[in-house]
Image (cartoon, rainbow, N blue to C red):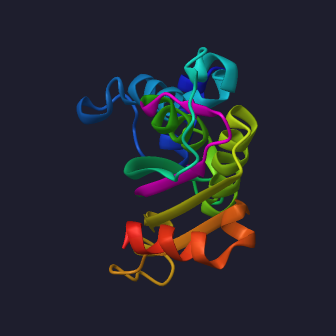
């Protein structure tokens, strides 16, 4: 059964008529949307980085702030939307700027929980750069908490993963937290 057929069955299961005017074509559009929202499954780290790793003498913190992210909660298939801050301490190599955002997107475009998303991004940046430390902080609003369940409209979740020097050195961690505000 195709994804489109599954969406037809879901609409029917909800008591809808998928052939009515407003829903005509919805199963096909929904299937395409879900494939787009989950395109991270068809991507891999080597393709994303595509050789954009450059020799550098800097060992100072590199921080990419406010990377928009859109993901789907693996528990309810509802969106969570937020921003990621990704920092690393280079160890002879720096990553092309856009690649950091692409790594965030690759993992966000999978069915996910925010805690795992933070770790996957951090470990991928660590793997690619061999950095002395990597930190990822994500703040997001979860529709599964806003639209259903407790229905808390102003809630957000913050998760962080600190590797290497960000975990071991309180001054480095404090500098990062100061920079992201």
Q: Is residue 74 visible?
A: no
Q: Position of residue 165 (x, y in %)?
A: 71, 63
Seen at 60% across and 31% down, the residue is 40
Residue 119 position (above or below residue 51): below
Magenta-drawn stretch contains 93: yes
Locate the C terminus by quadrant: bottom left
Q: Quadrant of residue 33?
A: top left
Residue 12 position (above or below residue 168): above
Q: Nearer the viewer, residue 173 or 76?
A: 173
Q: Position of residue 20 (x, y in %)?
A: 30, 32
Outermost residue toward the front in this view:
57
Q: Nearer the viewer, residue 77 or 123?
A: 123
**How many badges with numbers are in the image?**
0
Q: Position of residue 92 (x, y in %)?
A: 66, 34
Q: Is residue 46 visible?
A: yes
Q: Is 152 on the left or on the right of 160, as rendered?
A: left
Locate the N terminus by quadrant: top right
Residue 1 position (above or below residue 8): above
Q: Is 112 on the left or on the right of 144, as rendered?
A: right
Magenta-drawn stretch contains 12: no
| Magenta stretch: helix, strand or loop mostly | strand
Residue 173 position (above or below residue 75): below
The range drawn in magenta is 82-97
Q: Quadrant of residue 140?
A: bottom left
Seen at 65% across and 41% down, the residue is 125
Q: Position of residue 57 (x, y in %)?
A: 57, 35
């Amino acid at each position: 059964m195709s994804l489109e057929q599954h969406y037809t069955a879901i609409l029917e299961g909800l008591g809808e008529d998928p052939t009515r005017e407003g829903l005509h074509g919805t199963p096909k559009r929904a299937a395409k949307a879900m494939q787009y929202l989950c395109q991270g499954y068809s991507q891999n780290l080597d393709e994303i980085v595509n050789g954009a790793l450059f020799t550098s003498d800097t060992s100072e913190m590199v921080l990419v702030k406010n990377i928009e992210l859109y993901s789907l909660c693996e528990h309810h298939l509802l969106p969570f939307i937020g921003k990621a801050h990704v920092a690393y301490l280079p160890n002879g190599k720096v990553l092309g700027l856009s690649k950091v955002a692409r790594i965030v997107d690759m993992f966000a475009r999978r069915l996910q929980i925010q805690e795992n998303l933070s770790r996957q991004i951090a470990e991928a940046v660590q793997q690619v750069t061999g950095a002395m430390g990597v930190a990822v902080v994500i703040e997001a609003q979860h529709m599964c908490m806003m639209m259903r369940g407790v229905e808390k409209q102003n809630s957000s979740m913050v998760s962080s993963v600190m590797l290497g020097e960000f975990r071991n050195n309180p001054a480095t961690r404090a500098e990062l937290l100061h920079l992201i505000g």
